[in-house]
Amino acid sequence: MPTVIARVLGEGFRVFFLSAGLYGLFVGVVWGVWLTVPYVVPDYGMTPPMWHAHEMIFGYATAALGGFFLTAVPNWTGAPEARARFITLAAGLWLAGRMAMWFSGMLSPVLVAAVDLAFVPILAAKIASQLMRRPKPQNMIFLLLLCFIWVANLLTHLEWMGITSDTLQAGLRAGLLTLCAMIGILGGRITPAFTRNAMKRAGVPEAGWPVSVARLDKVGMVLALILPLSVLTLGTGPLAGVVALTLGIVQILRMTRWRTVWAARQPILLALHMGLGMLALGLILWGLAVLGFGNEVAAVHVLGIGCVGGTTLAVMSRAALGHSGRALIAPGPVVVAYGLMAVAALSRWVGASLDAGYPVAMLLSDGLWVSAFALYLIAMWPALTGPRPPRAG
């Protein structure tokens, strides 16, 4: 019988989905502490709000990406799964990056950058070797997006190192929008597909199944690639705003054919639809804000909390259940977590329009985020750390 540690480090989804949950909880708690008693938080090499933003994008989300790609790519290609030795190395590099960022106030910014930037290239190299077994363009595109993530992170560190003076915000925005691009492309595949499979199992006639429109999917993919690239090269200017606004509208058009109303009867499906819906809403709000209509920071949090937080929570819980041999039925606490994440995004968005109530809205949103991850960890702990249940019969 393998030990718990050996089991967790033996499969990518276990260690990285567990790490994402724990780190999402940790960053949320630290942010809540800073909002209430700022002097308790250690001295970073950057302001606490920038540490918070960076770690949500390049800390929490990259752990979720690691767990997903190390699990999904072998299924796509038939390549052997990563061995425990590689998974341990990759998890160690990810953790080292988080430690470097936490102690950045006491370390050389060059060292912090070198350690923090090490994880994504290692992950990309592994999945590139697996994708080359069946190199399909629709899958190889994720290597390009991982490059965008790495470059975006590099831009944040260049400003912290004093090499540039104006690349931090572009790096953070490009990193978030790259995550949104991945969700738009990948979520646009799996959300209607999973819904279609569920409807088929339920005996729904084929005429009522979700439909994917190839032309809309292609337009959405192209725009999803252009958006972070435009921010990386030109910053958050009018072009990025127009692209984001257009992509949000395209996303709504795609979702009108995905049978979201039927999916509402299965929370594990509905969570995916909600995450993609938040993507559409967040892109439209962000595009309008960049063009001068609305609060840009509020729109960023709809994308960060509602889209990235909500979708990763949905995907991690579904994948953990399926790959640990459990039924694809979200446990009650996880269902509550799905709802809390959506409310957290909306409360952060609405709170931005308040005056005296803005700090309260920020704390409420953070508390809902922390509660969602606490529930996720409690409910998914057996799937992430325990043995597979015996097969019936």
Image: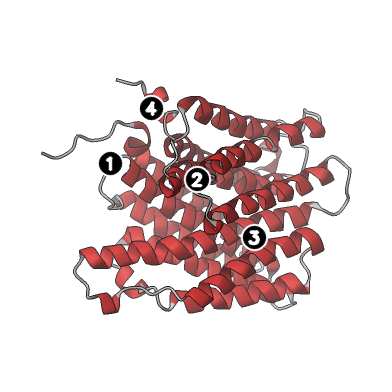
State the image quarter where residue 111 is shown: top right
How much space separates mark 3 and mark 2, taking CA atoms?
18 Å
Q: CA distance from mark 4 to mark 1?
A: 14 Å
In the image, which is nearer the foreground, mark 3 or mark 2?
A: 2
Q: Secondary structure at mark 1?
A: loop
Identify which residue is drawn at 52% across, 46% down: 131
Query: Does the CB distance between marks 2 and 4 fall below 8 Å?
Result: no
Closer to us: 288 or 327: 327
Q: Is residue 81 above or below residue 318?
A: above
Residue 35 visible in the snapshot: no
The residue carrying mark 3 is 177
Q: Which residue corresponds to the image point at 32% horizontal and 46% vertical from the top-left?
A: 322
* Numbered badge on residue 325: 1
* Disc with the residue nearer the chain's start (2 vs 4): 4
Callout 2: helix, strand or loop? Answer: helix
Applied colour scheme = secondary structure
Q: Which mark is residue 7?
A: 4
Kind of residue sitting beneath label 4: Arg
Q: Residue at x 43, y 39 (%)?
A: 13
- Give the mark, 4 or 3, whose residue is nearer the N terminus: 4
Is residue 62 visible in this depiction of the protein? yes
- Pointer 2 residue: 69
Instruction: Give the mark, 4 or 1, whose residue is nearer the N terminus.
Output: 4
Q: Nearer the viewer, mark 2 or mark 4?
A: 2
From the image, which quarter does the N terminus lie in? Answer: top left
Residue lying farthest left?
393
